[in-house]
Amino acid sequence: MNTLLEKILADCARYTKEGQPASYIPELAKVDPDKFGIFVSAEDGKEYFAGDYTDRFTMQSVVKPLILLQALMDSDTETVRALVGMEATGKPFDAFNYSDQALTGAHINPMINTGAIALCTLIQGSNYQDKFSRLLNLTRRLADNPKLEVNHAVYMSEKMTGNKNRALAYMLKAYGMISAPVEDVLDCYFQACSISVSCKDLARIAHIFANHGVHPVTGEQLFPAGYAKYVNATLATCGMYDGSGEFALNVGFPAKSGVGGGIMGVIPRRMGIGVFAPALDKHGNSVAGMQALAELSKELDLSIY
Amino acid sequence: MNTLLEKILADCARYTKEGQPASYIPELAKVDPDKFGIFVSAEDGKEYFAGDYTDRFTMQSVVKPLILLQALMDSDTETVRALVGMEATGKPFDAFNYSDQALTGAHINPMINTGAIALCTLIQGSNYQDKFSRLLNLTRRLADNPKLEVNHAVYMSEKMTGNKNRALAYMLKAYGMISAPVEDVLDCYFQACSISVSCKDLARIAHIFANHGVHPVTGEQLFPAGYAKYVNATLATCGMYDGSGEFALNVGFPAKSGVGGGIMGVIPRRMGIGVFAPALDKHGNSVAGMQALAELSKELDLSIY
Amino acid sequence: MNTLLEKILADCARYTKEGQPASYIPELAKVDPDKFGIFVSAEDGKEYFAGDYTDRFTMQSVVKPLILLQALMDSDTETVRALVGMEATGKPFDAFNYSDQALTGAHINPMINTGAIALCTLIQGSNYQDKFSRLLNLTRRLADNPKLEVNHAVYMSEKMTGNKNRALAYMLKAYGMISAPVEDVLDCYFQACSISVSCKDLARIAHIFANHGVHPVTGEQLFPAGYAKYVNATLATCGMYDGSGEFALNVGFPAKSGVGGGIMGVIPRRMGIGVFAPALDKHGNSVAGMQALAELSKELDLSIY
Amino acid sequence: MNTLLEKILADCARYTKEGQPASYIPELAKVDPDKFGIFVSAEDGKEYFAGDYTDRFTMQSVVKPLILLQALMDSDTETVRALVGMEATGKPFDAFNYSDQALTGAHINPMINTGAIALCTLIQGSNYQDKFSRLLNLTRRLADNPKLEVNHAVYMSEKMTGNKNRALAYMLKAYGMISAPVEDVLDCYFQACSISVSCKDLARIAHIFANHGVHPVTGEQLFPAGYAKYVNATLATCGMYDGSGEFALNVGFPAKSGVGGGIMGVIPRRMGIGVFAPALDKHGNSVAGMQALAELSKELDLSIY
């Protein structure tokens, strides 16, 4: 299996030359575009890996499924559903042109920025730093990695330049969908996007979603199975931005990408995968990462369709 | 299993009172809204059923996966992909407001009207009646039912009132995406929508998609496995109109609904399901049909997520 | 005055090199892009001219104010208003992406294709050839030119290639805004667009709109003053496609352009102008024509603002 | 003339019962909806009036032409044009759904919120309080009323609840169209909207626009004639929100309405009119105010078309 992973990275290395690292957050543009790593957390917790699998990068949108999970755990399914919809929007992740009429939850979903920002408000905590701490702790627990931290430079870069997210958050506020101070909510969201992880962390988190909340080694039920299915279904239809249909066809399992270059792949009942390659396509998805997942899916027959 | 199906129909019967049969095609409005049937084609070809599972209704959009399959078989994956995209549009199935700019394949997908009309042109045949005959034969073969026919009254009703589809087809033509005479293409499409089937037919067709092209009893490979995965992936992301995200969450497998009241459910590697209940929600999906599939999914753990 | 017109043509001749003649109707692409003419019908019917003012070209969208006028004369203001709106759409003249919801009159206006096609149905006549004949007669009468005829080659070219207009017309039909056979309505519309005129014809027609329906020489009231104001107000807000705001600023009077290269300018209570230069900008407006009108407006203080 | 104005107010008084005062700014909802006043500044500075013409209300969007004028005076036409477009958007004044692509100046105009906020940055001043002071001084000078002040309660109400404007401003900032701190720019904008005026003030300001910058009594040229034409042309195409086409037809001269219930009417080369009646239609325009202007336009033949 490690050999297979090595082969796939070699085969797909040329795709690291396609696309560009994210540039709209200045700190992200500094990354080495040749980096390429993969990590698989397989049945019974066996682990396989290749390339730059220990390199660290920020989660960016990969944190959205965790925000959704924490919101589900801290409020409940009905509250989450009342706040944000479930349908693909057919638009980029940071689109603002939803509707001529008032913005409603039906226009957005948890995997686009507007939806994820809104869901931060459903996390428990007496203030937004508390809320973020809960989310960070959940992420650490699912990754079995108590050392996960925010990349401060990326966080500050996001905070300084995140005016489109500010616009989206004020739109949510204007339509009564959030009531907390916008900068507080965004501070939680920007920190969440800036959590620094490796492929290994993503693969372990993904494995628990794949395993419907059960830790693959200890057997502990970390959260209800229904929440895992909620998250996985959302990833399948909206996880790869407006490239989700293409990804379903070419790869065939739930996944979430982030503009930091990471992708978290969830193969229900089987395994979790983390991949990292920072050059992105126009949708914001890692080019080489998607190719590697496509090849691995083919080799191991991972498509759920 | 038959007892389970009976119980589910009884539990969900009240949902036949919610929603309304399609009215925009006059002939469809004549249906009895209390009809409710279900059919399951399970492992090894064992079959289970309850309610009005022999009642006939027209396929309407349920024929779209078959048009996609025939187009894949008669041209190839690249040609299909070049003509129509894969992404959910975030819009109703008959939307025309895709873009300020020129319409391109990237704006549409095979499960919305515009995409399905375009794909009719990729079916082989010296004329559009030939093309339709191929599609009907494929449908008969997958359903193991050589008697499948067009419901002529519904076809005529669609032809008389299908001006929105005419608008969509002329838009395709205006942007050079189809070159054949619009009325010829539409005649193929309207006939396809008007094929009369039962829940049993849908379940058997679905089972072959679930089985990746292999007939569950004879073991014959009726079409390449890759085409089945193509269709199933498309159903998972776009099969239930702009209710696809909700359906993924509540039910959790690829499916296609039609405004005739039918839903075809594909549980990959396991089974095919047909359900019929003509009262529709605002997206055009059978209300009781979706409820029955949700309950069955829960009972048999059918979610693929 | 003729000297001024000569000077303006000379000054603006270089603009005939900017832009391109319309190419989407093959017959229109054959025009000589260096043609440039202007004609002014001034107070008391005095007439001035320069350049290719006798050259003939098809009216295209310049006929829209005449369709609106004929619809007002043959039905009444309320019926016209009930069918088509008055607001600028912020979209190109042949846009189809008005609304996620059903198309209504409020989405369109008489100066875009959809609105003008709809208004053809309000012209009196036992069939659409009769209706067109009434429109042609009105055009002849306002232009004082009984010889105006359809350019048959352009008409056939529009009919063969007018699929976007077919799409728009079927959309109108799908939403119940027109009931007649689409091809009949389009035949009226395509013929109207193909009426062959010169700058002189346009200037004389414009002068009667400027004069609120009164013939500037005979004094005859050809149609009610209120209809002229209706048309002129519509031209001021929507007459130059999605370049109407810019035109109001740079030129400052009601005008209507057509992709044949003509512009008809209406200076209320003062004069009518026709200009012809077939190279168009991205909005479909004659580049040199607009420049000539801007210069003339400045010289003679024609802005109504 | 005063008798005519009295008669018009009496005729149109019933329209004060149609529509509703603005409620989205809480302070505005407190107004008495029966208020109704009109003031005309006519040739040679003669003044006529009726009803509640001394009642004070906040300018709201009526200040937009003054922001545009101040921006023109403090930068120049090219800079203004480079920042904001001229075309009607076909959307409500506070729409945010302009484009799937990046926001550009071409998507907006000076009479919608996004455009007016952007133009505040072009006013001269070492800080935004200075910029606002310049704008207030200009307003005072045009109104011949040095006592004009901000209504502090309305300003605070706008500031507290103006989250949609914050969203629009952050969108401008995200796309590099403004660089100053958003709250500073908005403080200038919110104060501008909160300037308290009477019908008399509006009529006098309008008269100077009508007079192309020349004071009707002193004959002083307060600003270049070209700027007046710029503003008037913008009002004619976009001044009455997405009811501008209808207003051109029914009334027929440049005008600007505000959700405070005021309308400023500019009859080029003739007069200025102010009207006040706080019940608004769905576009945000004063219902009784528009009726009064329509009747006055008919009586005095004020239409410019």
Image (tube, coloured by chain):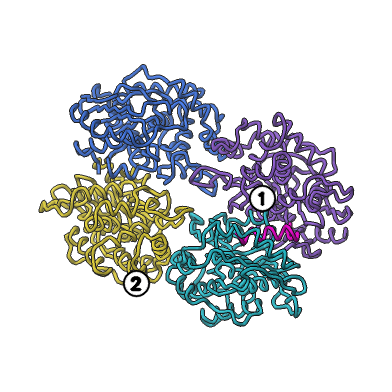
Chain colours: A purple, B cyan, C yellow, D blue
**Label placed on residue B107:** none
Given the current orientation, which residue lies at the most extreme top position? D147
Q: Is residue B103 above or below residue C302?
A: below
Name which residue lies at 38% across and 61% down: C176
Going by the numbered disc 2, the residue's amino acid type is Met
Name which residue lies at 48% across and 65% down: B29
Q: Secondary structure at mark 1?
A: loop
Judged left or right of residue B23, residue B143 is right
Front position in the image: D18 or D237: D18
Q: Secondary structure at mark 2?
A: helix
Q: Is residue C293 above or below residue A299?
A: above
Front position in the image: A34 or A218: A218
Q: Position of residue C136 (x, y in %)?
A: 23, 64
**Label placed on residue A284:** 1
| Highlighted range, magenta | B288-305
Chain ID for label 1?
A
Judged left or right of residue C176, residue C293 is left
Q: Is residue B295 magenta?
A: yes
Q: Is residue A68 magenta?
A: no
**Label placed on residue C156:** 2
**The C terminus of chain A: image quadrant:** bottom right
Most frequent secondary structure within the magenta stretch: helix
Q: Badge 1 local density, few (<14 within 10 Å), some, or many (20+)?
A: many
Q: Position of residue A226 (x, y in %)?
A: 74, 50
